[in-house]
Amino acid sequence: MKRIAFCFLFALTAAPVAVLSQAPAYSSNLPLADFGSSSGGGRGGVTSPISEPSPGIDRPFSRIAIGSGSSTLGINLTAATNLNRYMNLRATGSLFGYTMNNVTVSDFNVALKLNMASAGASLDLYPFPRHGFRVSPGLLFCNTSHGDGTFTSQPGSSFTLNNVTFYSSTTNPVQGSGSLGLHSQNPAFTITTGWGNIIPRRENKHLSFPFEIGVALIGSPAVNVALTSGLVCTAQGSQCTNVATDQIVQANLQEQVAKYRSDLDPLKTFPIISGGVAYSFRIR
């Protein structure tokens, strides 16, 4: 939790400095009106004064937006600032936790815990500034999303590994654990598109309802399953052996885990679907 909070603050503070260092310098020396020239379109040969551009909301880092919402990465908190008329810089932190206990799945009593935690930054590009459409490349600087579980077979029940059936002891049932990691690529590149400018380009508008959809390239999920204790037996309940040392059981378990990894491999392109609400205000 502390690591995610640190990464969110890093994305919010360090990224604008990097962008500002690359931004072109703005000159305060505005051209003066030429009232003495005989050329020009004004009356009596006097040219019209050149109007000074309004600083408006297009000045870099002149506005900040704070928002919240929910996504497939969890409940999120967002902070953003404007870089120019066409770009915003946005930092997002997401958290989600879910625990499930005493659930029966295929004759196993299962306890599961899912923890989603990530923080990152993105550059929001608006090709049409007064409209909400955007494209947003970015990075997840920190991602610790994972799931863990433990399971115990019901006494005397059967279970299948790699299409081979085994039987759990009636007196010392099989127990095990499993884990799923969703952060093998860290940091991870993200790309999304959506609608709704978190910092509206109209001066008197503050509230927005941004929506986005895209992917995070988090790498192939890490899947591990272990059978750690208990006895595995023949169908008649005899000839029982320790499941942790039974070579036939362990070989078929590894084959089954390889299938799980193959089935979950598409999650390396993790879907991002997000919606929420944000409020922006001027700071200078």
Image: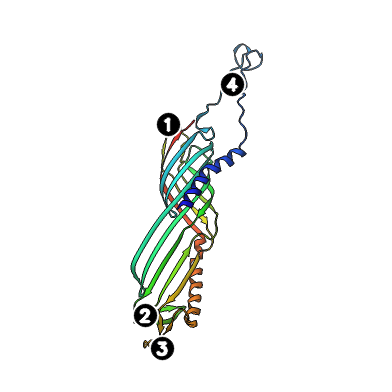
The residue tagged 4 is 50
Does 21 appear above or below 152?
above
- State the residue in front, 150 or 218: 150
Which tag, 2 or 1, sits closer to the chain's start? 2
Which scheme is used to colour this image of the protein?
rainbow
Task: Report the Cα–Cα distance between label 4 and label 2.
Answer: 89 Å
Question: Mark 3, mark 1: which one is toward the viewer?
Answer: 3
Quickly name the residue at label 1: 204
Q: Quadrant of residue 110?
A: bottom left
Amino acid found under the numbered disc labelled 1: Asn
- Front residue (pair 155, 262): 155
| Of the image marks 3 and 1, the number of the one nearer the N terminus | 1
Q: CA distance from mark 2 to mark 3?
A: 13 Å
Seen as rendered, the residue at the extreme right is: 38
Question: Of discs 1 and 4, which sits in the foreground?
Answer: 1
Q: Position of residue 230 (x, y in %)?
A: 40, 79
Q: CA distance from mark 1 to mark 4?
A: 26 Å
Mark 3 secondary-structure assignment: loop
Q: CA distance from mark 4 to mark 3?
A: 96 Å
Residue annotated with mark 3:
239
Q: Position of residue 241 (x, y in %)?
A: 43, 84
Bin the neighbour count of mark 1 within 10 Å (Cα to Cα): few under 14, some 14-19, many 20 and up: few
Q: Hey, what amino acid is under mark 4?
A: Ile
- Mark 4 or 3, closer to the camera: 3
Q: Mark 3 belongs to which amino acid?
A: Gln
In space, the residues marked 3 and 1 are separated at their CA atoms by: 79 Å
Name which of mark 2 and mark 3 comes first in the sequence: 2
Horizontal side, residue 22 vs residue 208: left or right: right
Q: Which residue is mark 2?
A: 172
